[in-house]
Image (spheres, rainbow, N blue to C red):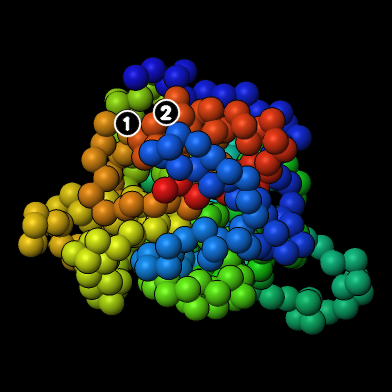
Amino acid sequence: MRLSEFDYELPRGSIAQHPLAERDASRLLLVDRRARAWEDHHFRELPDLLRGDELLVVNDARVLPARLYGRRRGVRAQPAPRRRRGYLSAEIEVLLTRQIGPGLWDALVRPGRKIRIGEHILFEPPPDPDSVGRPASATAGPVLEAEVVSRGAYGARRLRFLHPEEFESALERLGHMPLPPYITRPDETADRSRYQTIFAQRPGAVAAPTAGLHFTQDVLERLRARGVELRALTLYVGPGTFQPVRTEEVERHTMHPEAYEIPAATADAVNRARAGGRPVLAVGTTVVRALESAARSAPAGPGGIPQIPAGPGDAAAYIYPGAEFRVVDQLLTNFHLPKSTLLVLVSAFAGREFILRAYRHAVESGYRFYSYGDCMLIR
């Protein structure tokens, strides 16, 4: 398959730049794979669109304020010559992507080409006009300083933060919510809560599992009243989910694995639902990747049904058309970028040509796209 086969046209104005005032006011495109048809709805109608015996699995990862802005401090052992010190004032953007150990993080650095191993980056709060004339101790707070300990391709770096015991408090103070690049405005205070799902419990993600952003407590209560069972797993969403496909042949792309953990109660619920013929509804592509990755190495139980194991793992499954879905029967998901692995996954679930026709309807009908946009329920 060619990457160009997963392309579509989207007007810039269709990309949602802000969330709606009410989470469940978003629109929902109900997509029927068997009938090859769709219907327009709103998300708050979700409980009425389900049978009532589904197992709904969500991702409870919490997004970190993982975007930092700093400046180069040079290599400690080799001070920069005076004539070159001007470059140290240039702003450096750092996106933390994965924690390796205490104070040790993988990150994407921009501009990264000249950031060398051994160089230090200092992250400080912007000057506060109200602090002028006051003692430094009155306005001081935790700052961050990191040393570059290794480098990779496409701006990838491994950073070691000094004073790791202060890291969490400093990150909360200095970090920005890592809104995706197609949201062209700076992050705002409201994004601290709106770019989190109501399920968010376990910090570590650097992007939101956006299909869960539409849920409210009212919708959850109505789902439970219908008989829908709710369980959670954790997949720490990283940049691998959004890594661009750099090969023209879709099958040649390699996914970056993302860590997940499936609690025993969730694994048991999935296995019981599969054995009982109840639909498993994955809220988001992250849940799909965790469950299907677990299923690929799971032992078969009665009737040949994979028995999902509890515990940690790496979601390394790359799902493209032709893949077998062993666990997930229904999918709630936002609309995805052209030529992305997420659109490829959704195409594998419902068929490429059919999904692209549904996307065309969504564009023509004024649906809002991407992270803060509307969603579709595929069943």
Earlier in the chain: of badge 1 and badge 2, it is 1
The kind of residue on which mark 1 rests is Pro
Label 2 element class: helix
Would residue 30 be found to the left or right of residue 227 on screen? right
The residue that label 1 is drawn on is 321
Q: Pick the residue in front: 293 or 130.
A: 293
Counting from the top left corner in percent of width and height, residue 104 is at 41, 61
Separation of marks 1 and 2 at Cα, in angstroms: 8 Å
Q: Residues within 10 Å of mark 2 (few under 14, many from 20)?
A: some
The kind of residue on which mark 2 rests is Arg
- Residue 63 location, quadrant: bottom right
Counting from the top left corner in percent of width and height, residue 19 is at 71, 55
Counting from the top left corner in percent of width and height, residue 267 is at 25, 69
Counting from the top left corner in percent of width and height, residue 151 is at 41, 41
Contact (Cβ within 8 Å) of mark 1 with mark 2: yes
Residue in the picture at 24% in, 61% down: 277
